[in-house]
Image (cartoon, rainbow, N blue to C red):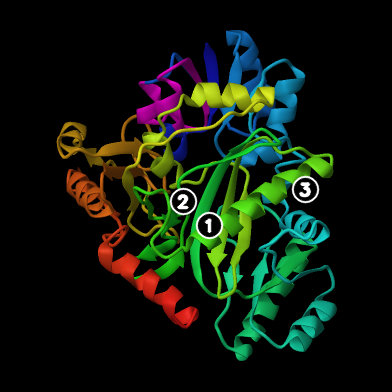
Amino acid sequence: MRVLLVGAGGRENAIAEVLARDAELYVVAGHKNPGIVRLAKDYALAKETDVPRVLDFALKWGIDMAFIGPEAPLEKGIVNVLEENGVPTVGPTREAAMLETNKAFARQLMEEHKIPGRKLFRVFDDVSEMKSWIDDFGRPVVVKPLGLTGGKGVKVVGYQLKDNEEAKTYAEELIKRDGKVLIEERTDGVEFTFQVFTDGKRVVPMPLAQDYPHAYDGDVGPITGGMGSYSCEDHLLPFIPKEDYEKALETLKATVEAMRKNGTPYKGILYGQFMLAKDEPKIIEFNARFGDPEAMNVLPILKSSLVEIGEEIVDGNLKGAEFERKATVVKYIAPKGYPTNPVRGVKLHVDEAKIREEGAKVYYASLDENFTMLGSRALAVVGIADSLEEAERIASAGIKHVSGEIFYRKDVGTRESIARRIELVRAMRGE
């Protein structure tokens, strides 16, 4: 079977690895990822959003199924075009991907269908109306652009009412730039990631994961695309009660059902970014694909064939997915200065053999075939074990065999950082 993968980040390296177990792999991506190149039968260099080039490549090789990694080509309607030309594709159509690509659409869908976990929101195109509403609201708010931001466009101002002045300034900038802005109530709590497979009707959960979006140890510094993540051997998280897990799953099931009723059926991978709040898990945002880094938590422990799951998704006949009962810890290595002013064009030194000797895996991301860093997160080292503590130890041991102008978060998946999250939830809920 010939499978086409679009994309070349760390997420796609993890996808490529599991697809290549059961299929001949073909790739279209904007740069040559050294981890994916060695798995691919053919590899075309093109922008992932260049839909005509991707289609030409798929038709040239007689591709049996395509798998879309990143969000940008989904927004361009790559699934629509491939499927119209006879290439079954794992991923939502342009209309269904609006769950991620248009935040106002997602919020309005949740409101219209009374989906649990929704937040109070308003969309504004008038500056004075926006400022007046924030003043009248009288509580801290979150300001979001409506479209894709690469995880970096949301502004969460402080805990205090006076910080809403900063929110108003940023919202005004967005109205002037984009024409509209989304304002939400601020929700405090602890974030977690819930990814599922869906064929438009059935929803199959993956292990929960938790991302570390801040650049530096101790959850400080600028927001990044994610400096690492972990998942536990029981596929839950230590601070999430079973009833909250069920509520979050119900939110995702209700969203898939709402999309079906809306006439925009959602097929592929759906990622819910949740905030475990005082009363229930709240949706912060949806993503229309695997998370990066969270794909690297779940795919290495996927026992089922991703090719077969993909076929079941496109056929509307999803049966299930089995995962090993293992814990995982992903630690991303980024160029110095990331995300605000990263060094570029500098080579990384990676001793893969030594990393493997430590029992760890490596996935490449913003790095070319010469191991030159391209400016974003360069590679991830992943530990997999029977316990979280052992998985973290393996990842930390593996990362010692990477050197260059780099940094990483040492606290990803550590007992101390997780204890801090457990304590936050207990304090919030008065336990």
Instruction: Return the mark for residue 258.
Output: 3
Report crowding for label 3: few under 14, some 14 to 19, many 20 or more residues within 10 A (C-alpha).
Answer: many
The kind of residue tagged 2 is Leu
Residue 378, given in percent of the width and then of the height, sits at 36, 44
Which label's residue is closer to the chain start, 3 or 1?
1
Residue 192, given in percent of the width and then of the height, sits at 49, 59
Q: Nearer the viewer, mark 1 or mark 2?
A: 1
Query: Which range is magenta?
Result: 15-38
Report crowding for label 1: few under 14, some 14 to 19, many 20 or more residues within 10 A (C-alpha).
Answer: some
Which residue was labeled with disc 1?
245
Tell me if residue 121 comes above or below residue 268 in the rendering: below
Q: Is residue 348 magenta?
A: no
Please tell me which residue lies in front, 120 or 356.
120
In this image, 404 relative to 173: left or right? left
Residue found 41% across the figure and 60% down from its top:
212
The kind of residue tagged 1 is Tyr
* Image marks 3 and 1: residues in contact by CB distance under 8 Å: no
Report crowding for label 2: few under 14, some 14 to 19, many 20 or more residues within 10 A (C-alpha).
Answer: many
Instruction: Return the mark for residue 171.
Output: none
**Distance between mark 3 and mark 1 Cα atoms:** 20 Å
In this image, 5 relative to 117: left or right? left
Which residue was labeled with disc 2?
208
The kind of residue tagged 3 is Ala
Q: Residue 279: name its quadrant.
A: bottom right
**Distance between mark 1 and mark 2 Cα atoms:** 9 Å
Q: Residue 325: name its quadrant.
A: top left
